[in-house]
Image (cartoon, rainbow, N blue to C red):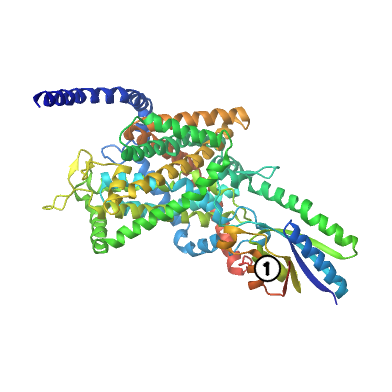
Amino acid sequence: MKFYQKVMLSLGTASALVSPAVAQEAMTLDEKVNEAFAAFTGPFVNLIFAPFPGTSFPWIVMWLVVAATVFTIYFSFVQLKFFKHAISLVKGDYSDPNDAGEVSHFQALATALSGTVGLGNIAGVAVAVGIGGPGATFWMILAGLMGMASKFTECTLGVKYRNEYPDGTVSGGPMYYISKGFSELGLPGGKILAILFSIFCILGALGGGNMFQANQAHAQISGITGAYPGWITGVIFAAVVFIVIVGGVKSIARVTEKVVPFMGILYVGASLVIILMNYDQIGWAFGQIFSGAFSGLGVAGGMVGALIQGFKRAAFSNEAGVGSAAIAHSAVRTKEPITEGFVSLLEPFIDTVVICTMTALVITISGQLISDPATGLYVLDGAHIATVDGNTGVALTSAAFASAFSWFPYVLAVAVVLFAFSTMISWSYYGLKSWTYLFGEGQTSELVFKVIFCVFIVIGAAANLGPVIDFSDAAIFAMAVVNITALYFLMKVVKQELLSYVARLASGEIKKFTH
Amino acid sequence: MTSKIMIGLDGHGSGERALAYATKLAKVIGSCELVVVYVIEWSPYSFQTPEENAERHKRREEEISTAMDRVINPALASLKKAGFSAKGIVRHGHVADTLNDLSDEENAEQIVVGRSTESGLVKRFFGSSTANLVMHANVPVTVVG
């Protein structure tokens, strides 16, 4: 007996000694990747997120909000006035039957949405609420509503200035509207801005469109299977993406494109069920959101902290003002570029106002965030709000859903992997379009980009959340710096389109087709 | 007064039989105009990758010219040979709805189609195009077995 106990004890000690050593050895590669990555991207990240002197308010957040406000006012609340018209366009009420078989408004919107709806809605919101508290949700919704005007502006231009090649294919996006639009208006510097945008778009494709996705997909999978090195997930993801974008195995992409919308519906459905199951807490949750929005309820940075998190995550999730969606929307078949602008304003609405809010409500209602019952303020664990199991990011969302349905993390894992995959496919296309804009089209040039893209999947899966999320944000926001600068110069073109369209709609020149 | 008959082809044997029957019908009626239609099954509500969207216009042109070459033009040639005035249309869409819409646009008096070629699960879930057309058409429909 004693001997047995002794053996067990020594085995126990041995395993206790061995396991950290093994873990450390396994972590080394991940840690090395992480360290090198953080050091390399640090200066770029610091520049983009530099706060206004004497405050903790990053100038870039102000940049996006000011732009969204300017566009909202300049186009006199286009997102409210034309919301119904946008739905009518998506339904095909204004589509010419002779154009049947071309890319419809619905398809352009769905494709753009599959690039934006993704981990930003699941993991990004958890990051926002985890740091900024439920109050961040209020600012997120506000940013989503305002962002609709930015999206409207960029997507109208995307269609107006796209390139239509003799073989029938189309290419559009900020690099095209910046260079063509500027030269049409006789403005200098269009070419330089277009090149700058392309560079940042490539970085954004590698960051938010790739590394962040791989990183959070790994976090979700390892949350279920137990910890294992991130590069393994990375290599598997990279292999599948490689097969699709280099090998041209479109069937995988097609299957994903068809499954992802259903995953989105399932996700919103499950959120609604959880919210309705706790209907007595809906009032309380909104109370937390509103009071948190203006007081912070004890989060780091108070109200400003909640606001920054909300605005940041909204911008990262719906990409309004970033310019990426203009690439996806530009393939639509329409005689009126502005119609795609109207349709595109639904994108931040669905993405941020509907889906992100669902996630935020579920996290708030689930009680994962620990608050002090005496003061009603949230308890902090470093910069984060303390959570029941110490979860952050996608793991927090997963835990929140699991508190209602214990099996939901498995569904969420599948959803996360698919969302990550479809976002990567979309962004590989955005990145590629920028790459070919810079380096010209051609098989070798395209192959080089695609290989780089796959390598970054491995790096993203292996690195820690912190540096990856910082770089992803920085790269995507850098796109917005260039894009919004250009939008200020080009917005009068959109205004002309808007006025002309409204006049023709009123005169009956543009009318519904009877189907 | 001429009578206009629309014929729905599907690129299969049943479409051929519909064509043969319509020809016979036209001979009996006498002065007849024939419209031969091929519908490419397509939905504006499907999901596609950005790359597919960028190439869509090109693919559509290819699909239409393939349908013209393989289905419509041979049918038109045989009709013209038999002395009929005929025209051909290729359009994307839901088969039953598109045939019905086109019969309105063309002022066709009747539609002749072959019996359904769908089978198994597809038929169980979505019904057959022919059955849908018969149920919703604005003009008389003849189904050829």
Closer to the camera in the image, A287 or B103: B103
Whether residue A307 sits left or right of residue A321 in the image: it is left
Q: How many marks?
A: 1
The crowd level at tag 1 (other Cα within 10 Å; few <14, some 14-19, many 20+) is: some
Closer to the camera in the image, B1 or B123: B123
Whether residue A438 sits left or right of residue B5 in the image: it is left
Whether residue A440 sits left or right of residue A417 in the image: it is right
Closer to the camera in the image, A137 or B48: B48
Q: Residue at x 61, y 45 (%)?
A: B54
The image shows residue A202 at horizontal and vertical percentages of 49, 34
What SS does tag 1 mark? helix
**Which quadrant is the C terminus of chain B positioned in?**
bottom right
Q: Is residue A240 visible?
A: yes
**Would you place residue A445 above or below residue A359 in this image?**
above
Q: Residue furthest left?
A: A2
Q: Residue at x 33, y 50 (%)?
A: A408
The image shows residue A91 at horizontal and vertical percentages of 55, 62
Q: Residue furthest bottom?
A: B1
